[in-house]
Image (cartoon, grey):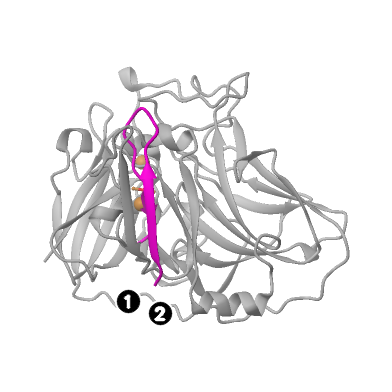
Amino acid sequence: GDTLDVTLHNALAEDTTVHWHGLMVDEANDGSGLHPVPANGERQYRFEVRNRAGLYWYHAHPHNRTGRQLQMGLAGLILVEDEEERALRAQLGLPWGERDLPLMLTDKQVDAGNAIVYRDEADDWIGNRVLANWTPEPAMTVAPGLYRLRMINVANARVLRPAFLHEGAPLPVRLIGTDGGLLDQPRIVDDLFLAPAQRADVLVDFGAVPAGARVLLRSLDYVAMENEDESGPLAPDIMADHPGAVMMGGALDLMVFDVEGVAAPPIHVPDTLSSLPPPPDTTGWKAREIRLSMGADGEWLINGLNFRSHGHHPAFEVKRGSREVWDIRNNMTSMPHPIHIHGVQFRVVSRSISPPDIRARQIADGGLGPQDLGFNDTVLVWPGEIVRVAIDFSQPFSGTQRYMLHCHNLEHEDMGMMLTFAVVD
Ligand code: C2O
Ligand code: CU
Ligand code: CU
């Protein structure tokens, strides 16, 4: 309900924008590359915050330069509060900034002098240095008790699989929220997949390990499924730009927590976190196909189109006030793509033909895992998978509002794995 009013002064020598990732705003305030702010230019963003409580973020979004500008640090967090969130906070009694913390996770490629490096037109930009809240070698001393950690992956390309390990074994944690805020009830998980742009709100009980113990937040190894056919002239030397980096899918230490001090009285976690409705019954909703693939020249495509050649012209139009299901289908000869839709928060209604690692996480009808059960703005679609999402296009704006649909692997986005769609009267 608050009005956010921010003026961007662009002191860079190139275009930039501020995009409010996850917030349901109109085109003029969306800060996509459709409205670049030139060097020395200025732009005011002013809109009412209509989202549920949750951890959202803002970042630069100029065409062709999003990967570079994020790698250099143009990103930050926005915490939205509402009554439900305040009620939960009062119940948990975890002081913000002490036992309720955002954890902004990323990897950077740095050179011998510790300067961040980036190569334009590169593919998946993974790095040799992990940062949490922009801090290298992140570590924290924690009390033996409950903590709320709001994790967000702000890496350019690396999909993380975070787990809290004690003596090598995962400490079960409660997942309480996703991109668009609180789940209806806590779900116990050992680990998660956190793709670029995704958020996971978790309760970790450091009281479950002995005082003096160390808990390691590690991204566990996983099958990266980079199945695209990049043989012959397309064959890249994927690690050439990334000396010292762990390959995609390799285990990566993110942060350490040293448990010290005396246990605080145990905290009761309520069974009901919020009034999140169940996923909608989508019978009769218009269905749309969103196909992800790679073209013959190695270019990433959505519905056969690449943004660099197709440009701003909306690839399709959606009626304001309508509700649609989108079937996002990834080619088997592809890699996992975190697909992000501007202007909305959607519900995942089903996953089919999922790889074994994903099938093993299914806890609800439709093949859904714990992270599919809330509102989301970014969904990871694995090779061969069909992920059906339900989107409600009611919005208080009028006229044509253009939004982006793109892969949040920023190198894919910059290389044109992006479309414009329009919400129309
Ligand atoms: Cu996080 Cu189109 O952006
Ligand atoms: Cu966004
Ligand atoms: Cu992608």
- Secondary structure type for disc 2: loop
Q: Which residue is mark 1?
A: 280
Residue at 34 percent of width and 36 percent of height: 412
Q: Residues within 10 Å of mark 2 (few under 14, many from 20)?
A: few
Residue at 51 percent of width and 48 percent of height: 153
Quarter of the C terminus within the rendering = bottom left
Q: Residues within 10 Å of mark 1 (few under 14, many from 20)?
A: few
Residue at 39 percent of width and 26 percent of height: 122
Is 185 left, or right, of 10 in this rendering?
right
In the displayed structure, would residue 121 be above or below residue 282? above
Is 305 left, or right, of 135 in this rendering?
left
- Is residue 41 among what the camera can see? yes
Q: Which residue is mark 2?
A: 277
In the displayed structure, would residue 129 be above or below residue 120? below
The span picked out in magenta is 1-23
Residue at 32 percent of width and 32 percent of height: 39
In the displayed structure, would residue 216 be above or below residue 373? above
Is 179 left, or right, of 310 in this rendering?
right
Q: CA distance from mark 1 to mark 2?
A: 8 Å
